[in-house]
Amino acid sequence: MRAKILTFSFLLLNFASGQDATEKPKDLIKLCEVCTCSEIPEIDGTDLVFNIQCSELDRIENVPDLHKVEWPENPNGLKISAAFEGLGLSTLSKLPPNTQVVTLRFSNNAIKTYWPDPFSDVPNLKKLSFAQNDITEITPDLFTKIHALEDLDLSYNKLADFNSMDFKSLNHVRRLNLQSNQLKKIPVRALQPMTALEDLDLGKNGIFDVLLQRVDGDTMKGLKRLNLNGNRIRAVMKDSFPANNSIELLDMSNNIIEIIEPEAFATCTSLRELNLAQNNITFTFALPPTLQIAMLKLNTLYHWPTFPAGITYIDLSYNRLSELYDEIEARFDNLEVLNIAGNQINDLAIEKKLPKLFSLDISYNLFTKVPKSLSSQNFPNLEELRLDGNPMEFIYFKNIIAVKRLYVNELSKLVVVDDKAFSNVVGRGLDGADENCFSLFLSNCPHLSQIRDGAFDATSLCMLDLSKNNLTHLSKNLLDWSSVGEGVDLQHNPWHCNCDLQWLLDELLPQMYAEHSRLLAELRCGAPRAIEGLRLVHWYNWTEQAFCGDNYLQSGPHGTYMLQPSTDQGVPTISRLGIILGCCVIVALLIAIALSVYLVKSRKRYLVRQAALKRKRQSAYDERNGNGKEQFSALNKA
Ligand SMILES: *[C@@H]1O[C@H](CO)[C@@H](O)[C@H](O)[C@H]1NC(C)=O
Ligand SMILES: *[C@@H]1O[C@H](CO)[C@@H](O)[C@H](O)[C@H]1NC(C)=O
Ligand SMILES: *[C@@H]1O[C@H](CO)[C@@H](O)[C@H](O)[C@H]1NC(C)=O
Ligand SMILES: *[C@@H]1O[C@H](CO)[C@@H](O)[C@H](O)[C@H]1NC(C)=O
């Protein structure tokens, strides 16, 4: 009896659970069956996370029904990170409960609307991204019950404004990304609850003014990084930033700033990096004493701002400077990088040394010669020196200077590089190498047609770029070519391939072939006519002295290798091709003659046959209409 009841209840239970089991798979989407699930290390740590990746490649059906997803079993109790990306979602529905979900990404969908409180059952969410969707508005019921949220990405949506309650429960958000929306002003009221905010990205909106000082309470007091790049800001005023703010990195590049009040940054007492590149700033302003990095390129500054003593990086390129900084005032003891390219400076009268400078760029200014202040005495730690695009007619380093890389490209007035031009340049060797060599970039000088034998006397090069000049000849004695370990780029020059350049085939070419064959692709002869345009590698490994006498065509290579045999076999190929072509023409002619003879003959036969036929038909017709003529005459008579 008892056994019977048990069996009965067992059956009943089974029935009930069986029903359950048949209902579940029909309704619920088992994420790991349609998406990719894996246990991977966290991006910024070594802990494992349970990662669920659903993208357009997965076969998710019913994608709008996120409330029907079933979170996977997570046997190890790991944190869950889930991404539903590029699925075309337009509505966000409420997610089923889970306390282990910490990251959710809905990037690159078309989300416009959402159910109320979509995340209220995933209370431990820390990171949430809606990047690249169609959200135009946020309501206070979107971010409810996710107090733990630390990182919110709403970039690339269509948000134009916020209500003051939109973020009311997000007091732990540290990073907020609102880049590329349609904001016209900084949503100060809405940001008020975000008292932990450190990193705010408002780049690429339509914000036109910054007046943060009037903000009450602790809003933005903890902000460390503020990005306002690519907006429509016209002025920076003394009340632009909150009093005693903590901003360390401020990016206001690519706006239309014309006015900066002298004390505009006075409240930024922690500022380390300031980016004001690509604006319309003409007048100087005070920089905070904490500043280390100043990006001011692409403005219209006529004068040097006063930089604080801790400055390490200055980019003032493409402004209107016509003079060097005032040495009495400037404190550049910590300066490491100075870029003043693209100004109108013609003199570098430096007397005080820049002990830490390792990169100096004075390209595209008005220097007519290498400034004599460029010396190791003034720049004891220089590694990279750029002099490109200056109107120099000659190159001569008067004082000894040690560098790793020297750039003298695009010197449009340079015709000849004289003896001893680089004799005072000393190398520092490339990273890791001890040799005292430096790399020289002397390229793109359209009139440079000669480098005298002594130009590199007493120097040692790690790399030499002479490409895109107007050089026809290169002396074997210019350098110890075998020591230029990082390669010699001689491409795009109109080399005269005569006996004077034979050494290049014999010595330099094999070295380049072995180590830097990419530098051979455009190394071609510019003369004589017969071999113009041919690659020098064509003669690689030839037995005879190809460039001396008339040997271009007579000898052949040891090996069979050609870089690009189809174009580079030159004249021999042409004559062989000629023969083949000639044969073809003759054969074609013969065929044509035979054909025309045949055609003429058959045409004749055809004509003869036609004539006979016509005659036959005519006589038959005449016979049939024998009385026709009589009828006519009868009519005439009538
Ligand atoms: C800013 O900080 C200074 C000292 O750090 C303090 O004297 C001043 O009162 C502060 N001002 C505000 C508005 O908090
Ligand atoms: C920047 O200033 C220049 C003249 O100084 C002016 O021609 C240009 O239109 C200005 N640009 C903007 C965006 O205001
Ligand atoms: C390059 O040099 C040749 C002479 O070798 C000269 O005729 C030509 O004008 C030069 N080209 C330029 C752009 O200076
Ligand atoms: C070049 O010639 C040498 C013999 O002189 C031969 O050993 C070598 O394989 C050749 N290299 C090529 C690529 O043909």
Image (cartoon, rainbow, N blue to C red):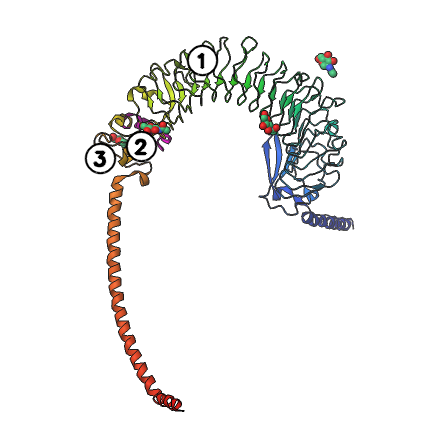
How far from the left and from the top, in percent, is residue 68? 69, 44
Q: Which residue is rendered at x = 25% and y = 68% of the image?
A: 601
Count neighbours of disc 2 (C-alpha within 10 A) and say few if under 14, some if 14 to 19, many if 20 or more: many
How far from the left and from the top, in percent, is residue 94? 72, 40
Q: Which residue is mark 3?
A: 555
Task: Dividing the image into four quarters, tell me where ligand 3 lies.
Answer: top left
| Of callouts 3 and 1, the N-terminal one | 1
> Which of pointers 3 and 2 indicates the residue nearer the eye?
2
Instruction: State the separation of the CA atoms marked 1 and 2.
Output: 37 Å
Based on the picture, tell me whether residue 517 belongs to the magenta stretch. Answer: yes
Q: Which residue is rendered at x = 26% and y = 27% of the image?
A: 502
Question: Looking at the image, do the residues carrying marks 1 and 2 touch, with CB atoms under 8 Å apart?
Answer: no
Question: Looking at the image, do the residues carrying marks 3 and 2 touch, with CB atoms under 8 Å apart?
Answer: no
Whether residue 46 can be seen here:
no
Q: Which residue is mark 1?
A: 374
Which residue type does callout 1 highlight? Leu
Count neighbours of disc 1 (C-alpha within 10 A) and say few if under 14, some if 14 to 19, many if 20 or more: many
Q: Is residue 447 above or below residue 553?
A: above
Q: Which residue is mark 2?
A: 526
Question: Looking at the image, do the residues carrying marks 3 and 1 touch, with CB atoms under 8 Å apart?
Answer: no
Instruction: State the separation of the CA atoms marked 3 and 2.
Output: 21 Å
Is 437 on the left-hand or right-hand side of 132?
A: left
Q: Is mark 3 within 8 Å of ligand 4?
A: no
Based on the picture, tell me whether residue 394 belongs to the magenta stretch. Answer: no
* Callout 3 secondary element: loop
Residue 155 figure quarter: top right
Q: Is mark 1 within 8 Å of ligand 3?
A: no
| Of callouts 3 and 2, the N-terminal one | 2
Bounds of the magenta segment: 505-525
The prevailing secondary structure element of the residues shown in magenta is helix
> Which of pointers 3 and 1 indicates the residue nearer the eye?
1
